[in-house]
């Protein structure tokens, strides 16, 4: 896909992977509220993705849902082509799609390791590559890591390793985009009340994790969406090549 300048009258366009639920869905809605036309990428749940798109359009925005396996280079390219066809190009890419399996290193099924790394590492690489090829001047790429990379929680070894790779990749991408006026950053949420985080955790575990930040609560998808919206905006354009730990103050 060739990179063409956006005309002043055209809307800014965002591609949000993992946009059917959780942080991705909240981010799609938040960017739409800022005037972005949004392409909501999803892996399998068409109903949720289309509901997310309807949520945007009901609020007066523009959105389409597009299915894509983000680790498949042809499907990822098709996702970006859909953005160009529907809305004329791509200005912001938010890569929120991810997978998490938790187990001690001695017990993790290697099939789960491979599946997680295919989504979290290969998928991030493929999406970042498409972003680098297509983002217009003034654009932004926002990847997702996790604060567990530095917190080193037991059972998070494989997941943390995959998210550490996201951080490394994004920081290199920022430098490779020199001269393009395009930023690349990673947001690393702390414990956030999403289905992905809450799955398999009992009330005691959730309460313990919620008590860790000085703000004494879990993050919400909306909290994280606000950080992404800032990085995607002109106000956040001087932030580049950074890992932003949005976790309520956990150190």
Image (cartoon, grey):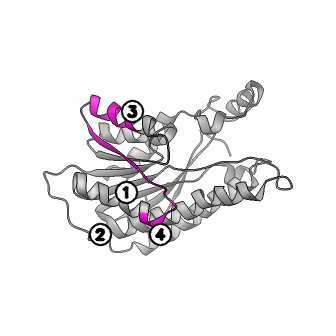
Q: Are marks 4 and 2 in contact (CB under 8 Å)?
A: no
Q: Give the Cα separation between the discs numbered 3 and 1.
A: 18 Å
* First of labels 4, 2 by sequence position: 2
* First of labels 4, 1 by sequence position: 1
x%, y% of residue 50?
A: 38, 37
The residue carrying mark 4 is 173
* First of labels 3, 1 by sequence position: 3
206 is higher (above) or lower (below) than 242? above
Locate the N terminus and report the quarter of the image it occupies: bottom left
Q: Give the Cα separation between the discs numbered 3 and 2.
A: 29 Å
Quick one: 157 or 75, which is closer to the camera? Answer: 75
Q: Secondary structure at mark 4?
A: helix
Residue stretch in magenta: 50-74
Q: Residues within 10 Å of mark 3 (few under 14, many from 20)?
A: some
The residue carrying mark 3 is 51
The residue carrying mark 1 is 79
The residue sitting at the right extreme is 106
x%, y% of residue 32?
A: 31, 40
Q: Are marks 4 and 1 in contact (CB under 8 Å)?
A: no
Q: Are marks 3 and 1 in contact (CB under 8 Å)?
A: no
Q: Residues within 10 Å of mark 2 (few under 14, many from 20)?
A: few
Quick one: 90 or 145, which is closer to the camera? Answer: 90
The answer to whether residue 54 is magenta is: yes
């Amino acid at each position: 896909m060739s990179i063409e300048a956006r005309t002043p009258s055209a809307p800014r366009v965002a591609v949000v992977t993992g946009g059917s639920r959780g942080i991705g869905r909240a981010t799609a809605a938040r960017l739409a509220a800022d005037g972005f036309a949004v392409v909501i990428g999803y892996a399998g749940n068409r109903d949720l993705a289309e509901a997310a798109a309807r949520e945007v359009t009901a609020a007066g925005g523009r959105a389409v849902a597009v299915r894509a396996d983000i680790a498949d280079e042809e499907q990822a390219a098709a996702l970006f082509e859909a953005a160009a066809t529907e809305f004329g190009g791509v200005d912001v890419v938010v890569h929120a799609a991810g997978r998490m399996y938790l187990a001690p290193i001695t017990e993790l099924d290697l099939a789960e390791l491979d599946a997680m790394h295919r989504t979290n590492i290969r998928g991030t690489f493929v999406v970042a590559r498409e972003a680098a090829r297509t983002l217009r001047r003034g654009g932004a790429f926002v990847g997702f890591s996790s604060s567990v990379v530095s917190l080193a929680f037991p059972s998070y070894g494989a997941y943390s390793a995959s998210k550490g790779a996201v951080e490394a990749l994004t920081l290199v991408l920022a430098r490779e985009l020199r001269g393009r006026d395009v930023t690349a950053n990673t947001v690393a949420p702390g414990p956030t009340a999403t289905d992905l985080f809450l799955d398999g955790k009992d009330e005691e575990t959730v309460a313990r994790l919620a008590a860790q930040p000085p703000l004494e609560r879990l993050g919400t998808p909306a909290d994280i969406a606000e950080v992404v919206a800032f990085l995607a905006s002109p106000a956040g354009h001087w932030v580049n090549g950074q890992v932003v730990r949005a976790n309520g103050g956990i150190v």
